[in-house]
Structure formats: structure tokens, C-alpha cells
Amino acid sequence: MTATIGESLAGATERLRAAGSETARLDAELLLGWAVGADRTAIVAHPDAPVGADAAGRFEDAIRRREAGEPVAYIRGLKEFHGLAFSVDPRALIPRPETETLVDIAIGEVMARLSDRPYEAGGGPGGGGDPIRIADVGTGSGAIAVAIAVALRHRSVTMGRHVTILATERSPEALQLARENAVAHAAADGMRFVEADLFPPVLPDDGAPLDIVLANLPYVRSDAIPGLPIAASFEPRAALDGGADGLDEIRALLARLPDVLAEGGVAFVEIGADQGEAGPLAVAEILPGWHADVSTDLGGLPRVLRIERG
């Protein structure tokens, strides 16, 4: 007998709840939608519709994988972030909703800088000068860089002329995923993808300094890794582990900023909710005289460290 959508969801929800999922119903809805090729709203709206045999088989396989702890995003092969669907797989960390705060801040900074120029950025001699140069350090899946590029395009910003984005990543596999996502969203214009540990030895454009540096580097304390949800064990540990206090990678980035950041430039670095005080202290230690403050995310938690030359 063919099960209905409602019956399939009920059974899967119970199984996932028993397996320890804190979002069992949502997981089941997302996975069933993926299995039948429909979005979640269509699934919820038609509980009496039958689930075909092929879709039922895909759904059963997906539920088994989720019961074992595999993230829903890896099972579906995609994750929604900043209104866009990104391809995701074990090559890179799954984009988190809290990182959208970093994207929104960066978009606001770019638009403010463009509006402050007397002429069009990238207008050439007598015009607006060079384009605004951005770096997304440790780009991973490319979610930050691509989301910014798409948002700027919607605001009539011409990528490559007005703004360029350098996306760096030490993992060649993750860097390839970022390229794939940029192409999928037609956002590769004005973007450069470079395999590098933080920054390449020589920046593009003959070493021209950067106006805006963005980074979502590993910031989880090493001793906190085992206590993360089991789904995190499927993600690259190197994309999570920030060392003893979670700030090792961030400190390494801070030490490089004087060499790459233009006068008047700014860096925005995502931090953990428990690093609202430690982040600025690290800036004071490594970059004396520089200014640092912290912005909160939608939950009111410390999330983005802003760093400027003193």
C-alpha cells in the first residue's frame, strides 16, 4: 500500500526524534521534499498525496542517513543561505544562518563606500578610481562571496568594474566548490579564486591593497569540538577548530592585516558568541592603536568583529 505524505512524515519524524534530532519534523519535511522533487511548502500543503515508490526509496535512504547524524544539507546537497541555494558537500563547512550578519554588514559597507565617491568607482582616470577590492578569506563553499556578489548585482553594482572579490581558501577541494557555486549563480564576474593560507604572497592587481577583508575562520575551541552536535562530525574539522581558545586562526589573520589592508580599509571577522570580549582584546594585543568593536547578530549575540586602523 502506498503511503501518503502525511503518513511518511509522521513515521520519519518519530524515527528522527528517537535518533536525537532537535528538528525532527523540519528535517523530515525537507528530506521528503527533496525525495519527491518538491519544495517544503508543497509537501506540507498536500498531506494526503501519495508518495511514489522511487521517491519513497530515496526518502528511506535519506532518513537512514539522517538517523546516523549526517547533516540534512549534505544529504540534499544544498543549503539555503541569504536567499540563495548553495551546493554543499563534505568539501566545506555548511553555511550557518548567523553568518548572514557578516554578509549584510559587508553589503552595507560596500554601498556606503560607493555612495561616498564623487564619481563612479572603476571609472578610470578622472573618474572614481579603482574598484573597491574585497577579500573573502577562507571562503569555503563560497557562500559569503557569492551572496555579496549577487546582492550587489541586484543593487546595480557592476562586478569587476565597481567591485572585485578575491576568494581565498587553503583547501583546493573547498575552493573548487566555491567556484561551482559562483558559476551556478552567474556571480563569477569580478571574482578571483586563489588557493592560499589566508592571503596569497602577492595580492591581485600587482599587490594593490584591499579595502575590505571578510573572514569566517574556524573559531570553535578545540575542547568544545567533541560536544558539538553529531552532524558537525561530518564537516571538515579544520573548518571548525580554532585552537585552545578558538582564536588561533583569527590571530593569524590579524597579524597579516597591516600588510594587506589599505589606509582607510576595514576588516570584518565572524566570531563565536562567547568571544565578544576576547576578540577585541586580541586586536589590542596584535594591532596596538587599531580600533575594534563588535556587532551582534539577530539573536543579540556577539557575531562580527570590526577592525580598523587607528
Image (cartoon, helix red, strand yellow):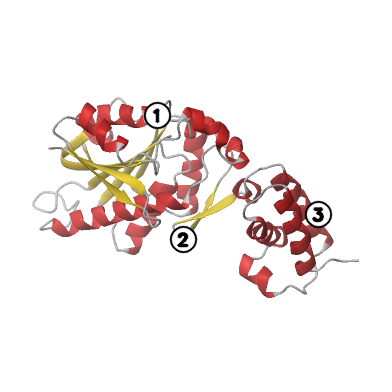
Disc 1, SS: loop
Q: Residues within 10 Å of mark 3 (few under 14, many from 20)?
A: few
Given the current orientation, which residue lies at the most extreme right position? 1
Residue 38 lies, with reference to residue 224, above or below; the image says below
Q: Please name the amino acid that badge 1 sits on.
A: Asp
Q: Is residue 274 above or below residue 7?
A: above
Mark 1 or mark 3: which is in front? 1
Question: Which residue is depicted at the point 45% across and 31% down?
Answer: 221
Q: Is any atom of residue 208 visible in this view?
A: no
Amino acid type at image mark 2 = Gly
> Which residue type does callout 3 highlight?
Gly
Q: Which one is earlier in the sequence, the residue at label 1 or at label 3?
A: 3
Query: Label 3: which residue?
Result: 57
- The numbered mark at residue 83 is 2
Q: Which residue is mark 1?
A: 245
Mark pair 2, 3: CA separation: 30 Å
| Image quarter in which the N terminus is found | bottom right
Q: Is residue 98 visible?
A: yes
The percent coordinates of residue 53 (x first, y second) are 84, 60
Q: CA distance from mark 2 to mark 1?
A: 32 Å
Label 3 secondary element:
helix
Q: Residue furthest left?
A: 126
Q: Which quarter of the figure has residue 56?
A: bottom right
Q: Nearest the camera: 213 or 250? A: 250
Indicate whether 172 appears above or below 16.
Answer: above
| Image height of 178 relative to 203, above or below | below
- Nearer the camera: disc 2 or disc 1: 1
